[in-house]
Image (tube, coloured by chain):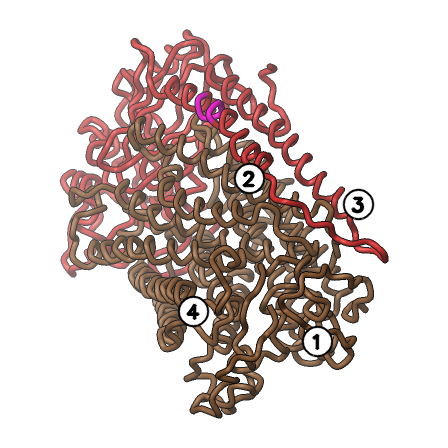
Amino acid sequence: MSLEPTFQLPEQMSTSAPHIDNLYYFVYWLSVVLFVGIVGAMCWFAWAYRTRPGHKATPTPHNLVLELAWTIAPVPLLIMLFHWGFQGYMDLSVAPAGAEEVRVRAFQWGWDFEYKTGESDSKLHIPVGRPIKLVMSSNDVLHAFFVPGLRTKRDLVPGMYTSVWFEATKPGQTDLFCAEYCGGKSKDQNGNELDFAQFKGHWAMHSDVTIESEEAYQKYLDGLGGNKPPEERGKSLYEKKQCIGCHTIDGSKGVAPTWKGIWGRQEKLSDGTTITVDENYVRESVLEPNAKIVNGYASPSVMPTFKGTLKDKDIDAIIAFMKTLKDK
Amino acid sequence: MAAVDLPIGGHAAESEHGDPNAPYYSAKKGWKSWAYTLDHKRIAWLYLTMISIAFLAGGIFALLLRFELWSRGKTIVDAETYNRFFTLHGGIMVFLFIIPSVPAAFGNFFLPIMIGAKDVAFPRLNMLSFYVYIVGATFALSSIIIGAVDTGWTFYTPYSVTTSNAVISMTFGVFVLGFSSILTGLNFLVTIHTMRAPGMTWKRLPLFIWGMYATGLMQVLATPVLAITLLLLIFERFFGAGIFDPKLGGDPVLFQHFFWFYSHPAVYIMIVPGMAIVSEIISTFTRRQIFGKFAVALSSLGLALLGFLVWGHHMFTAGMSEFSTMLFSALTFFVAIPSGVKIFNWTATMYKGDIKLVTPMLYAMGFIFLFSIGGLTGLFLGMLSVDIHLHDTYFVVAHFHYVMMGGTVMGFLGGLFYWWPKMTGKLYNEAQARISFVLVFIGFNVTFMSQFIMGSRGMPRRYYDYLEQFEPFHKASTIGSWILGAGLFFTGYILLSALFKGKKAPPNPWGSAALEWQTETPVVLANFRKPPIVTRDPYDYHLATEAELFDGFPEDAPKVAAKPSEKTPAKKSTTKKKDEE
């Protein structure tokens, strides 16, 4: 079977895809035969026994043999279909020993892929020809990891780990979706509609999977964290961890306070007190977004907690990045 | 099957409910006679009015959704509004329209007539169920005013514990609606057991009644679980009970188990009544006994039983153990057996029939066509490894619309056209009705066939926006929704214009042998002037007398003695129908 996309199914990019596609097309043609048989018979009878002068319905006796035949005949077929589906499912459930683990965290509304190096990204890179196991959890509500090209899908459930594994068969780039509804946001704290570009939600958790050669993968891992200065690391975290979705850095109004000139700014809080933005306030807001909310913004905050997602080193990098965003 | 003079004679004289021999809609007058009515036929009309409004509202949300998806980016509404629209579309269609649709409207009107009873067993409970429905609907829809729900009709936790408070009002509404459903189901079960006319043996029970019986069992046994689930959800929100929310030590997957333990049987609460109508229509318009009637009746009960055992197939990717996943997949495949039995037997009934392709029959055949697609695509989803790819995509959306809309709604529309002359005493315009069927049938297939393809190509459901590669399919689907919408609005026009200015209908315009067509039109308050004695099966065309199958006005009938025990085959040709214009 070709790896190219067919009319009904996308390109095959993993070792499990041929199994799933073969089954899909087997059931498809089986269904076509059954459907044509049933609907064909129905239409033929509707024509052949149409009402017309001199034509009458003829009673037929009960036919136990026929009745039993179409009750029992499908059973072996159904057992076969169940067996094939289950077999494939078990293969997909048990990751081979030595599969490389990637830790996946989903949140409203984005992905965080943490590699064995401890560095993380919002996009997934995987090497070709090697089993990869994703160990997944959710920070807030249900999400689902869905890559049509890899024929893989699994829910991410808060409070428990789920996992999938796959082995990519060819290099390339393919789409990654969230498949479990997880809400959306298109209005600011005052109920005013935002620009389309600022809409967030379930559909906007679209990301990419890049399947690449072993060398390119290693190069990608090296380039992820490495020896970049903290401000640059902070900038890339700002983009990858979806801070960018709500906090602007050009001073324009967003769902959350802008970061332009944030460092050292006096913020009036929702409880009436005033606070100066410093290292402790930023750290607290990243870990406990609801602790101190700036007056005029949604309470409780729509920001997810980054506890467990951002390490101390990452928070330091974000602080370093904030310090560069001076109000001119 | 004809009414026979009983020694006790007819009904008692005029009671507080009105003259038992007057048409049911004019036996008493004034709005109070409707608001406080205990007559099952009037309650059926109250229900039919409300569920038609619900269908209209759910349909308008569907058209808005499809219009938003016409193009990428924002077309008419923002993302939050879109999420509310699909929640309302699903919630209204499932809880306010499909679940009550056939049982509450046609079940109420025809169940007592079809078994030869004067009314249901508990007329007051019947009235109560309608008002409980109104209260539930009010709570559910007041959530729109309070702040709108955006959880989807499934209310999955933990999202539903964190989002707007309107969730409480909506789930409480659904909780209340459940009681309406339980009362209707209970009432029907008792009525079928205790109020059958003399001679209406279990063996002679019409298949519509068997369908109502299976539905009643599911309503009574499954709905309480939904009530418990929704109550727990409300507890979770009010008191932080920690049952479903992982932050409080709860388990979000538990909610899915609870929810689908009701909502899967609910799928059969929706489809079995649709199938029940199709059996009636097919027998009437092929003029034959339903082939394998006993097997068809058993398959309804089989679906009711299996409905309780397969809820887990909604959760194959949700994080269940491999063992339960295997069990649910295996059990799910058994659903194909009773579904197949029905389809095969209906088709076999048409063999050697005298088939009249009028609108109700077209809808019954439409049901077989669309439900076959809905059922066969269920095979894809039942196979575990294939489901992994298809789960939560538009393939699933298309699959359940083929079953729910292609099945239940086609059965419902077929039932409307089939029974409209009996319910209203008026004939609809057959030519217009056929055009409306063609519009509905084509519109439906264009809308949802394109969703199968984009789904298997990887388009996830409940998406406000989509990638460029899915645009042609979304465009096709939206165009289909306009054709479908036009067909349904036209259907509404045809039925209403028949009601207000249609020609007077004879008692048995289809020449059906079934009992509900043997009573006069308009139906009298007590259903039959003389309590009927049943002497044959409702589908025994070869045992029915010519007078019973006569399809004009009784005053024009040839003078044939209507002897119920006479076993001469009907000789009458049915080609000269007065209702065809």
In the depicted structure, whether residue B112 falls above or below residue B269: below
- In the shown orientation, is residue B191 left or right of residue B530? left
Give the spatial CA distance, label 1 vs label 4.
27 Å
Stretch of the chain drawn in magenta: A79-83
Instruction: Tell me what residue is drawn at x 50 percent, y 41 percent.
Output: B338
First in sequence: mark 4 vs mark 2: 4
Q: Which chain is red?
A: A
- Name the side, left or right, on which A243 lies relative to B382: left
Q: Check residue B195 in the rendering and tell me which mark sits there, or answer none.
A: 4
Q: Is residue A297 above or below residue B128?
A: above
Mark 3–mark 2 distance (CA, rounded to whole Å) = 23 Å
Q: Is residue B476 visible?
A: no
Above-or-below relation of A88 to A278 = above
Give the image location of residue A267, x and y in percent.
21, 53
The colour assigned to chain B within the rendered structure: brown
| Dots 4, 3 in contact, CB < 8 A | no
**Three-letter amino acid code of the residue under disc 4:** Met
State left or right for residue B364 relative to residue A53: left
Within 10 Å of disc 2 (Cα), the crowding (few <14, some 14-19, many 20+) is: some
> Which label number is shown at residue A48?
3
Which percent across, then down, holds residue B36?
A: 41, 84
**Labels 4 and 2 touching (C-beta < 8 A):** no
Report whether B498 appears left or right of B574: left
The three-letter amino acid code for the residue at tag 2 is Gly
